[in-house]
Image: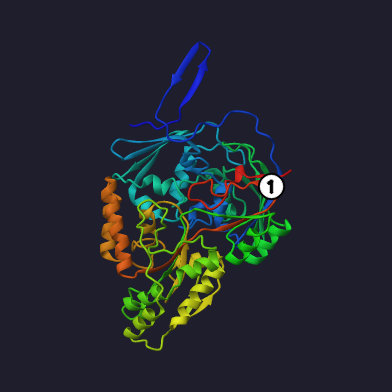
């Protein structure tokens, strides 16, 4: 086995001993008394916070739940400042030469928020319990999880799978987040959502459903004690209100502002706007394209939608120019992403395609659900579609209800989706293009075969070629209408001295334990 560990040197009483091993991760934290946390920070959310986001076991292939999950919970391996995929609850891990075994070693003396020890029993329990994004893919590849001892656990794969760590160690899924077996067995799933216990930097204190969640610093967090004592996560779906809260000091930070509201904070010398660099993208889905009786079975209609979108105009209105137009639904910043340019904005071409498809006077396309939290983008898309004769009515939804209906395949016609989860092109294919993906509206046999082929391919160049081919096929078939690569515009108030937004690789949210505020 190739051992991947941290470099450490220790002075023994009898002499000096240098232990050198191959590093994968950051140095262990310095053992010193951390200053006591102090103060309170209020963070205004762009959506209503769902209790389902307290439990990683059902996490969708979206980034938003991780804004709560990574506050309360922690994973064996994850990104944090200075680490794209760093050792977290696991102090080290190693992959066997044949790619069939992954062994993780936990940090010593880990505790959950209630004081219970965190052991490999909890690791196995968390994986076995997981039902969220890519759960079937993970369990199709993992033969079994072996508990070696309380600190060492091995994952045995059925066959080599180059993307095991992508799916287990990033926000592509929440499968690597560890929950307490004993506590969950006592309170059950619903009890856990009412009062979650984790091993992350903050402990759950209280929840006013639909209003706010209060978290308190966990003094036993392995990295360090959080600097801010109390975080108040407040649900404020209206963007103008969120921006005003930052201006008045009612909130210290706000997520995902619309362009016009962000502009107001940007011009204020007391506040700032920070654009994220995470793996997020928005697109239009055609869930009925596989139904021969549906008008959306006709590729020309789907192409018409693509030509109808003024992506640059949407970018300027909703994102102040930070959201680059997209030509494929894999974010440009992701590994193996096809750097494809979008189809041009051409209303005449859109109308011509509608006429050729038998709709010279346009088409009544009904309700248009759009992923909540981004009203300016949704309204701009609706206006562009209506302008060429694709008549839709924007349907307002809560975020949790939108995810549930998407996963249950209740949407028809067309709708606007989005995802900011990390991973690579393969994890996006699995979630949204592969016919068995939990959030895929359908699929094509050749894309399914190519997905399976790349999953076992250990040669990087060959994998990239296969993933490129899949992405090209989605473009050729107008399988989606990509809108833009999304950068969230985050508002920061004057009390925040260190916001940490952008310090965690491909994550739009701050590193909560590293936030600093004025006393």
From the top left corner, tell me how far across and down residue 333 is, in percent.
42, 53
x, y percent for residue 276: 53, 54
What residue appears at the point 37 percent right and 86 percent down from the top-left corner? 359
Residue 324 lies, with reference to residue 130, above or below; the image says: below
Residue 391 can be seen, yes or no: no
Mark 1, residues whose alpha carbon is within 10 Å: few (<14), some, or many (≥20)? many
Q: In the rendering, at what x and y percent does residue 166 appear?
A: 40, 47
Quadrant placement of the N terminus: top left
On screen, residue 122 above or below 8: below
- Which residue is at 54% across, 46% downward? 503
Q: Is residue 494 left or right of residue 429?
A: right
The reply, left or right, for residue 312 in relation to residue 442 is: right
The answer to whether residue 395 is left or right of residue 410 is right
- Name the one closer to the observer, 426 or 347: 347
Can residue 517 be seen in the rendering of this structure?
yes
Element carrying mark 1: strand
Where does the image place residue 397, in percent across and percent down from the top left? Answer: 55, 70
Q: Quadrant of residue 365?
A: bottom left
- Which residue has dot 1 on it? 230
Q: Quadrant of the C terminus?
A: top right
């Amino acid at each position: 086995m190739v051992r991947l560990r941290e470099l450490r040197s220790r002075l023994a009483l009898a002499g000096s001993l240098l232990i050198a091993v191959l590093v994968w991760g950051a140095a262990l934290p310095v053992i010193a008394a951390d200053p006591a946390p102090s103060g309170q920070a209020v963070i205004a959310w762009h959506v209503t916070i769902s209790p389902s986001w307290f439990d990683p076991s059902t996490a969708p292939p979206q980034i938003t739940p991780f804004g709560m999950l990574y506050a309360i919970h922690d994973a064996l391996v994850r990104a944090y400042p200075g680490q794209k995929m760093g050792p977290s609850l696991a102090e080290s891990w190693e992959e066997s030469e044949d790619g069939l075994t992954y062994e993780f070693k936990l940090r010593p003396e880990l505790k959950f928020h209630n004081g219970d020890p965190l052991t490999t029993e909890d690791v196995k329990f968390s994986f076995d319990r997981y039902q969220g994004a890519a759960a079937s893919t993970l369990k199709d590849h993992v033969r079994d999880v072996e508990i070696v001892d309380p600190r060492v656990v091995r994952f045995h794969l059925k066959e080599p799978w180059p993307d095991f760590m992508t799916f287990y160690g990033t926000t592509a899924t929440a499968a690597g987040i560890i929950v307490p077996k004993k506590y969950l067995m006592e309170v059950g799933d619903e009890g856990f959502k009412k009062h979650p216990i984790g091993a992350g930097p903050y402990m759950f204190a209280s929840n006013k459903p639909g209003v706010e969640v209060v978290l308190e610093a966990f003094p036993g967090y392995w990295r360090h004690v959080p600097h801010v004592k109390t975080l108040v996560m407040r649900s404020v779906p209206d963007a103008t209100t969120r921006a005003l809260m930052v201006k008045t000091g009612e909130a210290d930070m706000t997520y995902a502002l619309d362009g016009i509201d962000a502009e107001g904070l940007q011009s204020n010398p007391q506040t700032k706007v920070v654009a994220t660099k995470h793996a997020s993208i928005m697109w239009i889905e055609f869930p009925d394209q596989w139904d021969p009786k549906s008008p959306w079975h006709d590729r020309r209609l789907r192409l018409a939608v693509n030509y109808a979108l003024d992506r640059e105009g949407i970018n300027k209105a909703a994102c102040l120019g930070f959201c680059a137009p997209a030509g494929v639904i894999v974010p440009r910043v992701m590994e193996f992403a096809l750097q494809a340019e979008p189809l041009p904005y051409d209303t005449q071409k859109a109308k011509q395609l509608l006429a050729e498809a038998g709709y010279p006077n346009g088409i009544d396309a009904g309700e248009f659900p759009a992923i909540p939290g981004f009203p300016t983008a949704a309204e701009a898309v609706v206006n562009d579609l209506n302008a060429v004769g694709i008549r839709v009515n924007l349907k307002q939804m809560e975020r949790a209800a939108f995810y549930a209906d998407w996963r249950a395949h209740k949407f028809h016609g067309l709708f606007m989706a989005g995802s900011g989860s990390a991973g690579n092109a393969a994890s996006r294919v699995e979630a949204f293009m592969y016919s068995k993906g939990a959030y895929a509206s359908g699929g094509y046999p050749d894309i399914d075969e190519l997905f399976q082929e790349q999953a076992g391919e250990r040669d990087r160049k060959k994998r990239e070629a296969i993933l490129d081919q899949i992405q090209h096929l989605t473009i050729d078939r107008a399988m989606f209408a990509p809108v833009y690569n999304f950068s969230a515009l985050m508002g920061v108030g004057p009390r925040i001295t260190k916001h940490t937004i952008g310090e965690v690789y491909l994550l739009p949210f701050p590193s909560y334990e590293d936030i600093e505020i004025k006393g």
